[in-house]
Amino acid sequence: MERAIRIVVLSLLLSASQINCQEAVLHITNEHVVKDYCIVFNHSWTPLSQTLQEALQYPLVNYTSTLLCGPEGVTADVKGKALVVMRGQCDFSQKATIAQNLGASALLIASNTTLITPSANDSEYQKVHIPLALMRYRDFLEAHKELGEDMQVKLYSPPHPKIDPSIAVMLLIAVFTVVLGGFWSGECERERLNHAERSDGGDGRADSGDVFLYSPLKVVIFVALMCGMLVLMYFFYHILVYFIIVIFCLASASALFSCFDAVLEKVGCGTIRFSVRTYTFSVRSIILTAICITISVIWGVYRNDDRWIWILQDLLGIAFCLNFMKTISLSNFKICVILLSLLLLYDVFFVFITPFFTKNGVSIMVQVALGPDASGESMQGNMVEVPAEPQPPSEKLPVVMRVPRFAAWAQNLCGVQFSILGYGDIIVPGLLVAYCSRFDVWINSRRKIYFVSCCIAYVLGLLVTFAVMLLSGMGQPALLYLVPFTLITSAVVAGSRREMRQFWTGTPYEVLDSSREPLLSEGRTDNLEGEKC
């Protein structure tokens, strides 16, 4: 059951995706009140000023009683003013052309439906020279109620830097998790070997809770199950998402317990035990269990509150990834190459190829990662959609690290935007990092040459991923960059140290003798003929 749960969760570890938005701020004032609202515009059609100070101020004229599909109905002088009309019946360009001919200096279109980036034919773009934007009709009604008829407006679009601080936070989270997970895996391996020595001839097998991938056929089946699970999630998202949420709550609470318990054990925190009939209980375990379950339940209850719940989700996600890397072991470099290569193809196929087969042109990977409402990817980040009315929160899979875009957070009136990174982009290369850490233990490498080299390669691969994402403006399958960086680096290190044979075949526990001597001492480069490793 535990292995099945891990397969289900790992099949949903997804790549990051970001959307470039064309959202702006409508600044409305009168003599006493100031209000800011979300508007949506097209910067390639009607660009706006970048700051409030640079933006021109216009008196606002209320013509929401008309659709402005013709000049009739506009009786007052609108020259030099901002005109607000209702959306419908005719194109945005037609409304803008009529408003411009009437002398208006800006046009706001109030909408009762989803706000979309206004667009027109290329020939129409040259005809309109006034700012044009869409706003929520309910926002206009609220402003009209609080400020009255005497309203002055400014339209401006604060620049959002491409390199948002959230990317640095995401990088730190990913690197911290991979490095700590690999180190933890190596230390557990060292403890197992030391325990086998003290046990005078124990076989040094892993704990019963650990899962080893050692057969290429099982790896292929494992990846095939991941593909099948992802396709099922695409077609039955609204049903299976709750199943995944429940699994995540249980798995993350268990992982958080393992992490906290390991920390307390490392710092030497004692525990009090008591017995009830034939059962023995630990006070520390009971307290930790209560804390971890509480954190998981709080996340489950408030999982759709974007203001702060991302902190808990990232905490649980870090614990989940750490525990996964510690308990799932790849037995040799051959299995690492097979698994990571197949997952690279899996990632690229479901991100780049599947948009050609889906109805809305959105990749299956992005659709599952961001939920059924993920429409920005199909338009390559050039369009944005903002609900006109408050929407019930849509359920999203909790298999990504989420960090709000801090540069846009203070003025993000249209909704909090997030940078995301899938757990798979941490766990999959992390499994190779963990193998390198264990191999350092097997060869008694004091400098941890394999572990350190693979961690550096992971950092470089992640930097390249973010760079390509920022330059292209689209989400990227991170494994496309992380897998080559980590695999090639590990192979080069093994080849340069003349340890590729041992690194490729790994070290089955069964062949280690009772003395637990390392396969190779640090600096020794001779081949061990006849020794199986």
Image (cartoon, grey):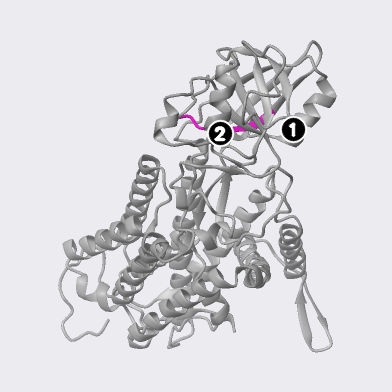
Q: Which mark is residue 92?
A: 2
Tag 1 residue: 139
Left or right placement of residue 165 versus residue 387 in this view = left
How far, Cα to Cα, is label 1 from label 2?
20 Å
Whether residue 41 is in magenta: the answer is: yes
Q: Are marks 1 and 2 in contact (CB under 8 Å)?
A: no
* Residue 247 locus on image (x, y percent): 64, 72
**Callout 2: SS:** helix
Instruction: Say which quadrant the C terminus sits in.
Output: bottom left
Q: Amino acid at mark 2?
A: Phe
For residue 381, which numbered disc appears in the image? none
Q: Is residue 512 visible?
A: no
Label located before the other in sequence (1 or 2): 2
Residue 282 relative to residue 531: left or right: right
Labels in figure, total:
2
Q: Please state the horizontal and vertical placement of residue 237, each as a whole percent of the image.
A: 60, 68
How packed mark 1 is, by other alpha carbons closer than 10 Å (few <14, some 14-19, many 20 or more), is some
Residue displayed at 46% across by 44% down: 381
Q: Nearer the viewer, mark 1 or mark 2?
A: 2
**Rendering coords of residue 416 (x, y %):** 63, 41
Mark 2: few/some/many CA within 10 Å (<14, 14-19, 20+) = many
- Residue 514, quarter of the rendered image: bottom left
Q: Main secondary structure of the magenta part?
A: strand
Camera-side residue of 199 and 95: 95
Q: Position of residue 133 (x, y in %)?
A: 59, 29
Q: Quadrant of the N terminus?
A: bottom right
Residue most toward the front? 72
- Visible residue check, residue 412: yes
Residue in view at x 45 percent, y 35 percent: 163
Q: SS of the residue at dot 1?
A: helix
Please report the bounds of the magenta region as a residue range: 37-43
